Amino acid sequence: MSYTLEGKTGPWEIVVGLEVHAQVISNSKLFSGAATAFGAEPNSQVSFIDAGFPGMLPTINEVCIAQAVRTGLGLKAEINLWSRFDRKNYFYADLPQGYQISQFAHPIVGKGEIEVTLADGSTKMIGITRLHLEQDAGKSIHDQHPSKSFIDLNRSGVALMEIVSEPDMRSPEEAGAYLTKLRQILRYLGTCDGNMDEGSMRADVNVSVRKAGEEFRTRCEVKNVNSIRFVMQAVEAEALRQIEVWESGGTVDQETRLFDTARGITRSMRSKEDAHDYRYFPDPDLPPLVLEQSWVDAIKASLPELPDERRARYLALGLTPYDVHVLTLEKETAVFFETVAKGRDAKLAANWVTGDFFAALNRLKRDISDPPVTAEHLGELLDLVSDNTVSGSLAKQVFEAMIETGKAPGVIVEERGLKQVTDTGAIEKVIAEVMAANEGKVAEYRSGKDKLFGFFVGQTMKASGGKANPAMVNELLKKMLA
């Protein structure tokens, strides 16, 4: 069922395209050797090139080029063996060169696509128009002085991948799903950390509305949205604004807008410039970028398993779609699960990781990079369950002790005497004691009150301190109560 917004004149369809700026993971900038670490002292990571000193010549960082190609391959996109850097000319205080080195007519990556999964389980393909490389600008800081703005050039020259989608999204949910999937792919590839709160990934949201069957109407661009939730809110807010404009007899002007997160509305920023206003021309200091197909092939051969392939493999192991979604959402979670499940029952491993382990993470406010129990130790605990050394309920006790002590499960089982009792004679002795203490209930059971069976199971497990093998308890009770 298609998503529409209701106006006074009936339903309207939303059309959305995203331009995502993703900061490339590299130790130095796109055209200089300055560092890129987040959180450094202002203006402490700035070369003469980044500061726009005259006569400084840019030098291409090969790592950034490889990361862009790697991303293009991960997006199933065309890799252009010939591309070119252009100068995009405009003035802004935090752009010391007076231009940005970008790629306009000839980007490094062409058309690709991403498959997204929606809440109802349906899937949709979203087209990628292009990926091009460009420098980031610096940062203007307006809250440090009552009458002056400060400039931090640490970000100036940092490599960005601008990933432009086709206008294929038709709802806030689809925009959120696309951005979530794109960030997931980049993190799996190791080409961008996707930390939107640090500004290393942000989105320009292009929105228009139309009546069913119409051509596209005028779009507006909502600039620099820095969370998936805000992207979804901005889509809806801007679409509602445009519907109101059209229905009141006005026309939507093509412009750049900002999303006011406090008020949940978009505000006009500036009228939208066309490409010719930037006076693009090939950068005279940089020759065209020419790649060898063999070099691209080598990068392709080194790609990790991507989310879609991993999902398919986990489904083939018999995991539920929910398990698969949760375990593949973040690469670190998938790696943790792989270690736990290696050589073991995948479903048992999934149950423990998504159940007790995730519950412990939430309770302790830890994340997968700082787990309360190592993947190796959790795997060893599953071995103890599988070989009947401990029962499922005892395993939970052992797990909590692992969190408290950091010790291996085998050590805890030995120290605390938690080994499961599988000796038939020992269990029969406990059952005999339980039956002797509850002769009235034994008589009731034998007269037809089958529901009392659970009572005897509970009493036997309690008397054994939870150590008796539950399956053996059930089997022996049936015989002895008969």
Image: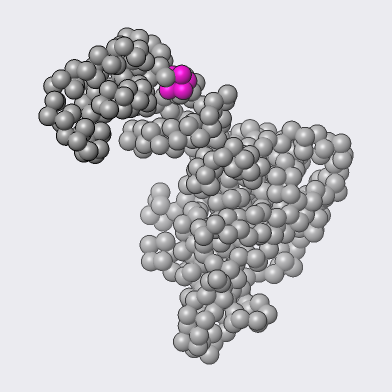
The picture quadrant where one finds residue 56 is: top right
**Picture coordinates of residue 197 (x, y %)?**
47, 47
Depicted 24 relative to depicted 248: above or below: above
Q: Nearer the viewer, residue 248 or 408?
A: 408
Q: Is residue 153 visible?
A: no
Quarter of the image that includes the C terminus: top left
Magenta stretch prevailing secondary structure = helix
| Residue 385 on the magenta segment | yes
**Picture coordinates of residue 368 (x, y %)?**
46, 32
For image coordinates 40% across by 36% down, the residue present is: 355
Residue 127 relative to residue 459: left or right: right
**Picture coordinates of residue 363 (x, y %)?**
32, 35
**Picture coordinates of residue 161 (x, y %)?**
67, 48
For image coordinates 52% across by 81% down, the residue present is: 11
Quarter of the image that includes the N terminus: bottom right
For image coordinates 44% across by 28% down, the residue present is: 370
For image coordinates 34% across by 14% down, the residue present is: 424
Chain part drawn in magenta: 383-387
| Residue 116 on the magenta segment | no
The picture quadrant where one finds residue 214 is: bottom right
Residue 111 relative to residue 396: left or right: right
Q: Nearer the viewer, residue 253 or 324?
A: 324
Residue 442 relative to residue 9: left or right: left
Depicted 57 relative to depicted 178: above or below: above
Q: Nearer the viewer, residue 144 or 459?
A: 459
Depicted 428 relative to depicted 54: above or below: above
Q: Residue furthest bottom?
A: 249
Q: Residue furthest top?
A: 415
